[in-house]
Amino acid sequence: MNGILVKIFATALAFSQVTTRPDAVKTHFDPVQDQVEVIRLLQAGCAHIREVFKIEDINLDDLIKTAMDDPQAMSGGIKALHGLKFDELFTVYRQFCKNETVAHSPVDIGDIITFYDNAAANLPDHTKLKDLKLPGLTVVLDDEGSRFAELGEPDHRRIWVPLVDIPELVQKAFVAAEDKRFFQHRGIDERGMIRAFVGNLAQSGRPQGGSTITQQVVKNLLVGDDVTYERKIREIIVASRLERTFSKPEILTLYLNSIYLGRGSWGVEMAAHSYFGKSAKELTLPESALLAGLTKGPSYFNPDRHPDRASERLGYVLTRMHEDDVISADHMQQALGQLPRRVAYDPPRRDSGFYFVDYLGREAKMASGIEVLTAGSYTVHSTVRTELQRATEGALQEGLARYEPQDRPFAFSRATGKFVGCRATHRVSAEFDCRGHNWTCAKSGAAVPAEADAGMAPSPRDSASATL
């Protein structure tokens, strides 16, 4: 049996269950004893999808005929269909969708069940997303209230906000752009999948996606984004479960705080600051539509590098919002044209204050019970003086580099609390190799004179304080 057919119909088995009996989805079938049940499920799923094609005014039989006449036109740009034999697919279509008896079916139900069982095993627990607040960006301000440092985990540069702090216009812009039937479907939008599939056949260029907002939440936060049939099976089942456990506002909150929108920004609030220097509460219609359009591909539709693509995408989102009666025709026309003005992109960077910021983390834990500053989105008001901090660190490193004897390096002894001689240790150079993300190596690698006492080093408490 064609391996692609096995994967396609294993995915169809997941799809058939969530669309025809979402409250009784099974993740395991016996490859021998449950073959009749699986065949019935596939037939029910095919009957359901034929009805959806009718709703979308698409003749499925004509589409199948086109595939038989010109297979390359159907699958040339769709990687998931590469290697598929359309004559075998047509035979299976007749078997399950038209309930015809075929002499030699290319389908081995046992193989389909085995593939499905393996893919659906050990699904992630969707309930752990309940009341989830993803890691966020903490900003440290200096003594003048200017931004001194950003603290965040990799791929989590975000400012988490509740849904009530995201205007309805912004919410509807993202729904219009990504999932117009979000409030009607139950996790899987078969009509959207069909529209995307047929649209991809009709035009070249960047392919349309058929994933719902719920599926995107599951992909981003639970099952990963590897492009495989196994992942799609897991995504379909978990998305269905998520819809039965979470409300639509809860799912939308997760989505709007987890999506990547370019400029190193995750979530709509961080993106609003990165692109427009303002909160999501203050976004205008064209600004909201521009951000919503970036979800499809932040790099591809990057307004800084590809303004033409971004303009086209902006027009698409505004048109969808008008079709969904979110905005009037006049508002749509007013928002079309030039891209909204954006602030300059200034990627976060820092070359000093690493010890100080580490100290702030310890203070936050002791004073406020905050285990990790990156667990949420905080603003830390500190007493650090940016230029003085940078000058002091530079002078210290240059002084140590000049004072250190070339043939007798020394290191700090944690056991005695003093600097002692040693035969081998890391040396501090004038270039301060331990700066940046590797600054912690300086804690154990700095070499200074043996006669220097630990008490000579100033305590962070002598020069800094912070409030949360």
Image (spheres, grey):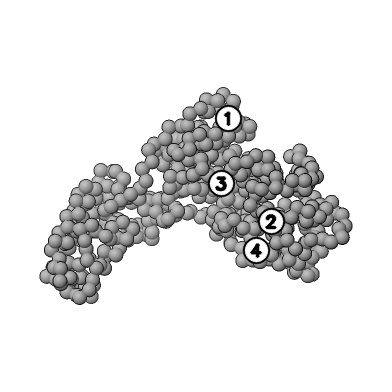
Q: Secondary structure at mark 1?
A: loop
* Residue 49 showing in the rendered view: yes
- Contact between marks 3 and 4 (CB within 8 A): the answer is no
Q: Secondary structure at mark 3?
A: helix
Relative to 307, residue 184 above or below: below
Q: Amino acid at mark 1?
A: Ile
Q: Nearer the viewer, mark 1 or mark 2?
A: 2
Q: Give the residue number, with chain letter if any, for mark 1.
A: 327
Residue at mark 3 to residue at mark 2: CA–CA distance: 37 Å
Q: Give the mark nearest the N terminus, 1 or 3.
A: 3
Image mark for residue 119: 4
> Sequence order check: which comes first, mark 1 or mark 2?
2
Do callouts 3 and 2 mark residues in contact (Cβ within 8 Å)? no
Q: Nearer the viewer, mark 3 or mark 4?
A: 4
Q: Which mark is residue 83?
A: 2
Of all residues, the one furthest to the top in this rendering is 330
Sequence order check: which comes first, mark 3 or mark 2? Answer: 2
Taking the image as drawn, is residue 281 in sight?
no
Q: Amino acid at mark 4?
A: Ala
Name the element at disc 2.
Answer: loop
Residue depicted at x 58% and y 61%: 125
